[in-house]
Amino acid sequence: MPDKNKVGLVGATLLGGWRLMWSILVATGVGQALYDFILWAHMIQLKIVIGPFNLAAAATLIVVTAAFGYVIGYTGAWMWNRVFPESRA
């Protein structure tokens, strides 16, 4: 039976970590080049400019996304435990 809290922490780490990596890319100036490459590789032509790094925005993005990941993981483990309960024979 999966532990809801542990699965929630995994979800928070994955989603929050993904946004942490994006924030680091923006802070180091690599974000725009990466985004331009992704659009080019998908044959999409859009003029999108990645703004300057903002610590408050980055922290908010990371915290909100990590909280969302926790809720998704916790809810997924809760549903799994409800659908597939362990036999108590």
Image (spheres, helix red, strand yellow):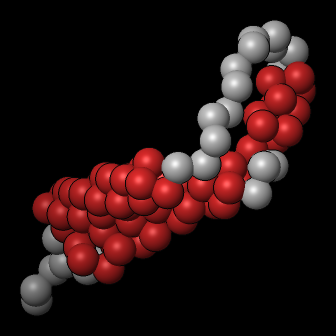
Residue 29, image x and y in percent? 78, 49
Residue 30, image x and y in percent? 81, 49
Residue beneath the point at 63% across and 35% down: 51
Question: Could you say which is closer to the camera, residue 75 or residue 57?
Answer: 57
Q: Is residue 69 visible?
A: no
Question: Could you say which is closer to the camera, residue 30 or residue 52?
Answer: 52
Query: As displayed, is residue 78 above or below residue 1?
Result: above
Q: Quadrant of residue 18?
A: bottom right
Q: Is residue 46 left or right of residue 13?
A: right
Residue beneath the point at 81% across and 41% down: 34
Question: Could you say which is closer to the camera, residue 56 or residue 21?
Answer: 56
Q: Quadrant of residue 80?
A: bottom left
The image shows a total of numbered marks equal to 0
Q: Is residue 10 left or right of residue 28?
A: left
Q: Residue furthest top?
A: 45
Residue beneath the point at 54% across and 55% down: 19
Residue 71, image x and y in percent? 25, 57
Q: Quadrant of the C terminus?
A: bottom left
Q: Quadrant of residue 76?
A: bottom left
Query: As displayed, is residue 45 above or below residue 35?
Result: above
Q: Quadrant of the N terminus?
A: bottom left
Residue beneath the point at 32% across and 79% down: 6
Residue 49, image x and y in percent? 70, 25
Q: Residue furthest left?
A: 88
Question: Could you say which is closer to the camera, residue 27 or residue 67?
Answer: 27
Q: Is residue 83 visible?
A: yes
